[in-house]
Amino acid sequence: MAKSKCQRIDLQQSYPCPCRRKGCLIPITLTEAFGCDRCQEIFVVDESGYKIEQVAVHYPYKPIWQWTGNYWLRLNAGPKVNIPLLFLAFIIPVIIWLPLVLHSTGPIILWAIISFCLAILPALIVWLSSRR
């Protein structure tokens, strides 16, 4: 699929809503912003005039779109997962628990399962926090 060239956003024109709710973005008077007549969201045009950003969102990142002339192209899909940090959150508990498991007197399978669960817990916390 070929990339479409983005077009400058005209502040006097109306556009379809990028939230996919079949709304229409209408310019807000005396501002560089648009309001959707259906979902009531507000979008601000950036300084370059080629991108809009959703204003009132409850996420730590704000969605950004570019107008291609026919449709909105979403630029950022969200935060990226930090793979090295996720790997460290998994490997450090394994390194700590491995000597304890090898020198234990109980059944090794039970210790291996406990070690694996305790190693997964920090990795799961890092992954969930990076998604927010």
Image (cartoon, rainbow, N blue to C red):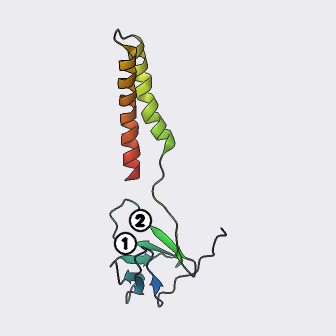
* Label 1 – label 2 distance at C-alpha: 7 Å
Identify the residue at the far right of this view.
2
The spot of residue 119 in percent (x, y) is 39, 30
Q: Residue at x 36, y 30 (%)?
A: 117
Q: Classify 10 Å Cα crowding around label 1: few (below 14), some (14-19), many (20 and above).
A: some
Secondary structure, mark 1, is loop
Q: Is residue 129 left or right of residue 68?
A: left
Quarter of the figure with residue 122? top left
Question: How many residues crowd around disc 2 within 10 Å: few (fewer than 14), some, or many (20 or more)?
Answer: some
Can you give x and y, in whole percent of width and height, for residue 110 in the image? 35, 19
Tell me which label, 1 or 2, sits earlier in the chain: 1
Quadrant in the picture for the N terminus: bottom right
Q: Which mark is residue 62?
A: 2
Q: Position of residue 27 (x, y in %)?
A: 41, 87
Q: Residue sitting at 37 percent across and 81 percent down?
A: 36
Secondary element at tag 2: loop
**Residue contact between numbered discs 1 and 2, judged by CB atoms under 8 Å:** yes
Residue type at numbered disc 2: Lys
- Above or below residue 75? Residue 22 is below
Percent coordinates x, y for residue 13 in the rendering: 48, 90
Name the residue at 44% across, 67% down. Answer: 63
Q: Nearer the viewer, residue 8 or 24?
A: 24
Q: Residue at x 47, y 91 (%)?
A: 12
Residue corresponding to mark 1 = 55
